[in-house]
Amino acid sequence: MKTQKRKKFRMKKSPSVMMLLILLFMFVSMPVQAVIITQSFTGFWAQPDHESQGFDFQVINQNDGVTQAIVYWYTFDTVGNPMWLAGIGDVVGGEVSLDLLTVTGVTNLQENDPATRNEVVLATATFSFGDCQSGTVEISPKPSTSTSNNPNSISGTGGIFRIQRLTSVQGSSCSGGISDDSTPGGSSYEIEQFMINTGIYPNGNARAKFKQDTSSSEFEVEIEGIPLGMYDLSVDGEIRGQIEVMNDGNETEGEIEFESPADEDELLLVFDPQGKTIEVLEGNIVLFEMVFAPADPGTTNPVDNGAPPFANDLETEVDLNNTGLITSARGSVKLEQDLTEVEFEVEIEDLPLGNYGLYIDGEIVGTISVTNGEGGPEGELEFSFPADANDLVLDFDPRGKLIEIRQGDVGVVLDVNF
């Protein structure tokens, strides 16, 4: 399993006035870097401009997949009595809006009795974050409750004020990008797919690649074979950046790269491109387009034998997880789909020499022989449909299935939910 060194697209430096003007244009026209609210924003956020007040901010995922924030505001009423308000709202990118309410008519340690409870909305709040450590909240009091005669009143003026992180969840890290919401212990995978050329520049081509592991996410789009210039990248109808096509001496090419967490010279990945419409635009003209890695790509196979459908140059690769039975063992699973063939390959290495069973959802589909190779003990098993002379027939669909490498009948050495 070889890992190719990934080339990075860099703008060549030039002292010319023209290049400085181009850089200035790019700076003005590029979208402002922003963060999205992820689970890593959970923590206590203080109000540095106010005395002894702040917010408990918790980001949760509901069963329906909607991301929400639960907020508790620890503050005081207009006469100095301690008061806390609570609210919940949907997270939209880097912002969340919600009503803040309090409860009246309840005494200390009173038995649960909804009939005596009165929920009063005192204000609405909108939270925005510029980075992982600071943000703002806009408080808009409800006029009917913001009076000095109301014992649960807050300041009637409201306004926008700063908030600053005080605490974070132990073991969490924050980049403000999509990797913050990665599942601990989740699988690593990579998807690469060529885009459809709309015919404006017939000799051009473009491709997109998404890579996910347990701690980072990467997305890049490369284009080549089209005239020099600046081109917009649109994801789900929103311009996410610009690609500069330059001449490297052999051909014209350009690249844009997003990462989470991001280095200083890279764009922060704050969107998930999977299942989205990706377009490369010249003004309002679409040059390349596709739905990136759709759930059911391509057309159906001419003969339905259980293999995945044909697709437009779609590649998915996932690392196998080591169960601890053989600590040195590692491997990967790859599925490649084009318009005429589907290939499925499993590679394993650094295991004792011998035979290992390949199981798909508990059913054995083949045996991998580990022998001494140039890099040490290794073995692989390849399936294809239609089958090549040296491959096994791919007559099953591994997508969404439990894939296991077993030693003997019971010992699972490597596995992954593909």
Image: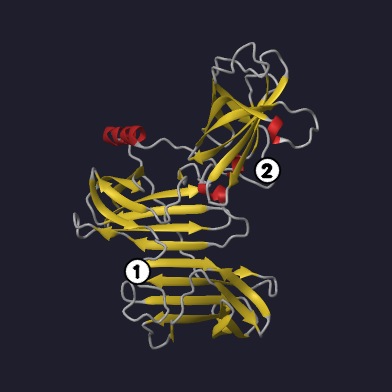
Q: Picture coordinates of residue 368 (x, y %)?
A: 55, 84
Q: Picture coordinates of residue 333 (x, y %)?
A: 51, 72
* Figure quadrant of residue 230: top left
In this view, the residue in front, 238 or 174, is: 238
- The amino acid at mark 1 is Ala
For label 2, the crowd category at 10 Å Cα-Cα, with few meaning under 14, some 14 to 19 and many 20 or more, is few
Q: Is residue 26 above or below residue 277?
A: above
- The amino acid at mark 2 is Val
Name the N-terminal-most of marks 2 and 1.
2
Q: What is the number of the mark on residue 106?
A: none
Residue in view at x 74 percent, y 28 percent: 106
Q: Picture coordinates of residue 289 (x, y %)?
A: 29, 55
Q: Which residue is mark 1?
A: 311
In this view, the residue in front, 342 or 328, is: 342
Residue in view at x 51 percent, y 76 percent: 346
- Which residue is most to the top? 148
Q: Is residue 137 above or below residue 229?
A: above
Q: Secondary structure at mark 1?
A: loop
In this view, the residue in front, 56 or 184, is: 56
Q: Secondary structure at mark 2?
A: loop
Q: Is residue 25 above or below residue 220?
A: above
For label 1, the crowd category at 10 Å Cα-Cα, with few meaning under 14, some 14 to 19 and many 20 or more, is many
Q: Which residue is mark 2?
A: 169
- Whether residue 101 sits left or right of residue 228 in the image: it is right
Q: Picture coordinates of residue 35 (x, y %)?
A: 50, 39
**Distance between the Cα atoms at labels 2 and 1?**
42 Å
